[in-house]
Image (cartoon, rainbow, N blue to C red):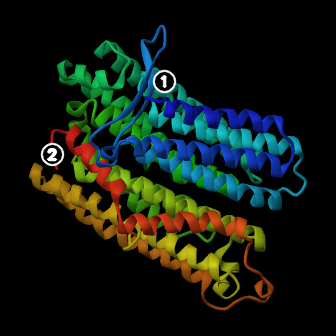
Amino acid sequence: MYPLLLLSMVVVLAGSFISLAVKGRKATSLVATSSLLISFLILLSASLISESLFQGNVSYVEVYSWHPFGTAGFRLDGLSVTFALIVLLVSLMASIFSSSYMDKRFKEITNARWSVYYFLLLLFSFGMLGTVLATNIVEFYIFFEVMLIPSYFLIAEFGHSNKDKASFSYFIWTHIGALLMLAGLIALAYSTRTLDIQQAARNAITLPAGIEFYIALAITLGLMVKMAGFGLHAWLPGAYTEAPAPVSALLSAAMSGIAGYGIIRLVALTLPGGFSYIAPWLVVWGLISIVYGAIMALAQDDLKLLLSYSSISQMGYMTLGIGSFTAFGIAGSVALYASNGFGKGALFMVAGIIASLISNRSMSSMGGLAKKLPSTSTFSIIAFLTMMGVPPTFGFIAEFFIFQGAFASAVIAGSYLRLTVALIALLGTILTTSYSLFAIKKIFFGQLSEQNSKLEEASLAFILPVAILCAVSLILGITPFLFNTAFSFVNSSMGGIG
């Protein structure tokens, strides 16, 4: 077996350091985009080597000796394949978008600054990719921290006027969450006598219920900080708003949902006994996040702030699906990660396009932009429809199965609480639709102001990444093999519980 997963990782890491060596916008952009594209194609090749991987039946695993931590490596299976492909796809689109956006936003940017920007962007992608492919508990934590550090510097060095406060809050909050998760991971490794994640799941069967619960609780709470669950979300609005648009796209569309991957992999599938006590409360937490994020999004006039609070709401849907503790609900959450990647990634880039054209993020100063920006408006509407879960976008697939899992768990448990939460969450989609339609109306329809009457459509370099993300959402909405893959894997891992 060829070391394709290792090669995919090495290509991204090598690209980040090569970016430091080359000079100029075009050269660094070419290096970054090429390395991400090559890595994506390698990963896709690994996925296609066995036709049954996309049916969730097999894993593509590479294991290497790692003294003194036993073995470590990379695993591509029915769960990690979706996260890994979305990380690389959104990173690739962000890299393409960055070349034009950062050039327009930082006209004075030096060659050295271009090199640093793409170095950090690729290192951020490297950390995210390693986190979802890791087979070893220590390896998982190292990549999780690698994910944090470059993302902090991307905000602190290239953000907007309040970048210092936003980046500091982001670093403190997410690092506290990482430390809490680390305490749980150490306890997991010590209790199961192994650092291998798969072996830990097998050994955890013998753990006392109390120990399993507290380990599951520590890991879940730590990861919920990164996922920006309600009450642990204080860092998110500032970080997403102050970051450059392509970095905001990566933070929202790729990074936050990786915490959901960690909860599924390290808690729900590794410590099912402990998670069974946490799951009902996670469902409630998801509902609160859905409603809070959507209401706050409705109250915003700043487009990036609206999208930032929307991210809290979207992660609430993911939390609801995971908390259902059913194969349909968890697989729906994996699909939600993908649909959020397409929709939110595209919308943060649209926010960057509009801000670069009118130097303003206030939706009150927009209106009627569909007349001047037909392509931008068309793809924006598709992205919003993805967030709303309207067929035939992939968002519909995600939300349909999240709610199927939520209602199924209520019926299986005979719980009126779960049933009530599922019903309220379903009604919460009205709020998602409301802020989406509100934004579409204020930005693209109505009276075109005189100051915007001379606008021209953005260049292809701006539009292409947005168009690709929207196209993939529509294609997967019609042929949802990513959901089928996740469902098959999760269903078999849970012993065939639908």
| Image position of 383 (left or right of 50) | right
Looking at the image, which is closer to me, 287 or 91?
Answer: 91
Disc 1 on helix, strand or loop? helix
Q: Position of residue 313 (x, y in %)?
A: 43, 59
Q: Position of residue 435 (x, y in %)?
A: 48, 73
Categorize mark 1 by other alpha carbons within 10 Å: few (<14), some (14-19), many (20+).
Answer: many
Report the disc number at residue 181.
none
Disc 2 marks which amino acid?
Answer: Ile
Measured Cα–Cα span from mark 1 to mark 2: 30 Å
User: Residue at coordinates 15% horizontally, 45% vertically from top-left?
Assistant: 497
Q: Is residue 390 above or below residue 70?
A: below
Which quadrant of the structure image shows residue 113? top right
Q: Which residue is the site of mark 2?
A: 497
Looking at the image, which is closer to me, 183 or 92?
Answer: 92
Looking at the image, which is closer to me, 3 or 158?
Answer: 3
| Image position of 188 (left or right of 364) | left
Categorize mark 2 by other alpha carbons within 10 Å: few (<14), some (14-19), many (20+).
Answer: few
Q: Which residue is the site of mark 1?
A: 139
The furthest residue to the top: 68
Q: Is residue 356 above or below residue 268?
A: below
Disc 2 on helix, strand or loop? loop
The furthest residue to the bottom: 447
User: Residue at coordinates 40% horizontally, 23% vertically from top-left?
Assistant: 185
Q: Position of residue 87 (x, y in %)?
A: 52, 47
Q: Quick one: label 1 or label 2, which is nearer the N terminus?
A: 1
Looking at the image, which is closer to me, 99 or 159?
Answer: 99
User: Residue at coordinates 22% horizontally, 55% vertically from top-left?
Assistant: 405
| Image position of 83 (left or right of 209) | right
Disc 1 marks which amino acid?
Answer: Glu
Asked whether residue 488 appears in the rendered view, the answer is yes
Q: Position of residue 15 (x, y in %)?
A: 70, 37
Q: Is residue 452 above or below residue 420?
A: below
